[in-house]
Amino acid sequence: MRIIAFTKYDREAASTRQRFLQYGPALAAAGIALDHRPLLSSAYVRSLATHEGFSRVEIARRYAARLSDLLAPRRPGDIFWVHAELFPFLPSAVERLVFRPGAPVVYDWDDAVFVPYQEHRRALVRGVLGRKFEHVLGKAAAVTCGNAYLRDYCARFCERSMIVPTVVDTDVYRPAERGEGPLTLGWIGSPSTWVNVRPLLPTLARFCHEHGARFRAIGAGKVAAGDASEGLELADWAEATEVSEVQRFDIGIMPLIDGPFQRGKSGYKLIQYMACGLPTIASPIGVNRQIVTHGETGLIASSADQWTEALTGLAGDAALRRQMGQAGRARAVESYSLASQAPRLVDLFRSVAGSG
């Protein structure tokens, strides 16, 4: 059996690594080959962080290459595994080219990709693309969804929509001894998600000032360069240092704005923190409520006062940080690890192929 994985980005995107590529060895062990076909390169992903722009000619070339790929002959038994959508900002008529007799299609969603179309400022985009996914999900053999919010949307059109959380390899993401230094609040993300942190910066700055702490943000890119804030340290993301950066934190945070797109986030950074044995503080938005057990694996905070209370409580109690970190680690291993989810995907693909 062969799975052709049509992802939006190459491996520098977390969604590609965590929801597709890391399953490669487990699929191979089950006799399933994973053939990865990204639409946009890692250079494009890096351009999002640097705001340097990317060649529209190259983007058009990549779209044309994907179209040619879709129209090429396939082997019997191939399964198409599509991340979100094949052609961003193209209508469903083009998307439907993926459907072939005898070639099941499984979609994977880890974000509320329908929201930007439905809420686009241009009426033409809303009119043409607002219902794009209704016309393709109904033809899918299955949809794997990062959380219940996404599952509930997809299940309106595809009965076989199931939750597969974004996970980490807990043999790689492990607790580590912290070196000397001030208490470190940590956040890891991307330029597009930094908008969720910005409203909290005054609260974090006051906390850092009063407690001699620092706030280390990984991956925010140039969009955060103008956000001067006491204690704020900005660092570039790199795959080689991703785990070691998280291991440097004492507390991992995931603030979110309450919006329809944010409600579809899959909580990946919380899983990273918990797997490394860190206590977490998160906004009560979307899947965060399911991942963080308040008072056990971390704390839930809405207002600035609640964030201050949560930060202060954890900062002053190293034993509580260890206790919550250990509980979070156990929960990550049990429910949010590669080992816990890989067998479910293997079973799904075998079933979809008719061999389960």
Image (tube, helix red, strand yellow):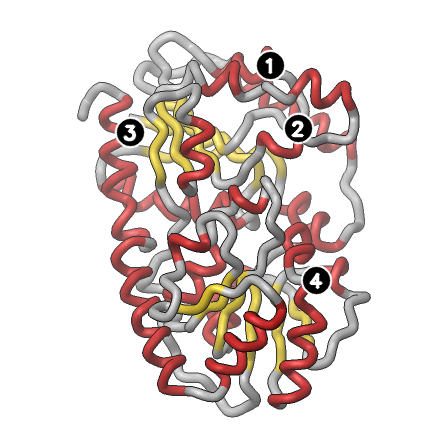
Residue, disc 2: 117
Tag 3's secondary structure? helix
The residue under label 1 is 94
Q: Is 250 positioned to the left or the right of 229 in the image?
A: left
Label drawn at residue 198 = 4
Residue 64 shows in the view = no
Q: What residue is drawn where x is 27% and y is 31%?
A: 348
Q: How far apart are marks 3 and 1 (CA)?
A: 25 Å
Residue under numbered circle 3: 349
Q: In which quarter of the image is residue 144?
A: top left
Crowd band around label 2 with a 10 angstrom C-alpha radius: few (<14), some (14–19), many (20+): many
* Type of amino acid at the residue the image marks with label 1: Val
Q: Which amino acid does label 2 sit on?
A: Tyr
Give coordinates of residue 249: x percent, y percent: 50, 76
- Residue 63's spot in the image, x, y percent? 65, 25
Horizontal and vertical percent position of residue 252: 50, 69
- Left or right position of 247 against 87: left
First reached walking from the N terminus: tag 4 or tag 2 = 2
Q: Residue furthest left?
A: 356
| Residue sitting at x 28%, y 40% | 28
Residue 196 image point, x, y percent: 64, 56
Instruction: Locate residue 122: give its quadrant.
Output: top right
